[in-house]
Image (tube, rainbow, N blue to C red):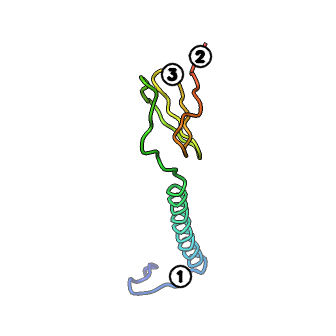
Amino acid sequence: MSRTPDADEKLPEPANLRFLRLLVTVLTGVMIAGLLTLLGLVVIRYTNARAPLPDAITLPDGARATAYTQGSDWYAVVTQGDEILIFDRATGSLRQTIGIEPAP
């Protein structure tokens, strides 16, 4: 006499197993919804946070740009001559020039 159930015989599923299956399904749905929400927020914040680039930047004679950065009402260009040129975003005029000194 064999104690293994027949293939056709359906055994009832334990209540704890049903509850665990429900928890895993709900957790999966919550994780997917949370991930989609986070990705959506990152995309929305990234597209709204960018300030427009200026059409053209007029550098002083002989200056050659190596880097660029920008703030809310200014943008800056780092030149090969070890200077940082800070321009006004609204007018495009040079606000300030900062010399970069080598570290001692």
- Which element carries disc 1, helix, strand or loop? loop
Q: Residue at coordinates 59% horizontally, 34% vertically from top-left?
A: 95
- Identified by mark 1, the residue type is Glu
Q: Position of residue 9 (x, y in %)?
A: 43, 87
Residue located beneath label 2 in the image: 103
Q: Residues within 10 Å of mark 2 (few under 14, many from 20)?
A: few
Residue located beneath label 1 in the image: 13
Instruction: For marks 1 and 3, give the CA distance.
Output: 74 Å
- Identified by mark 2, the residue type is Ala
- In front of the other: label 3 or label 2? 3
Q: Position of residue 26 (x, y in %)?
A: 56, 74
Going by the picture, which residue comes out furthest to the bottom? 9
Q: Residue at coordinates 45% horizontally, 23% vertically from top-left?
A: 80
Residue located beneath label 3 in the image: 82
- Identified by mark 3, the residue type is Asp
Instruction: For marks 3 and 2, give the CA distance.
Output: 12 Å
Q: Residue at coordinates 52% horizontally, 38% vertically from top-left?
A: 69
State the image quarter where residue 38 is shown.
Answer: bottom right
Instruction: For marks 2 and 1, give the CA distance.
Output: 72 Å
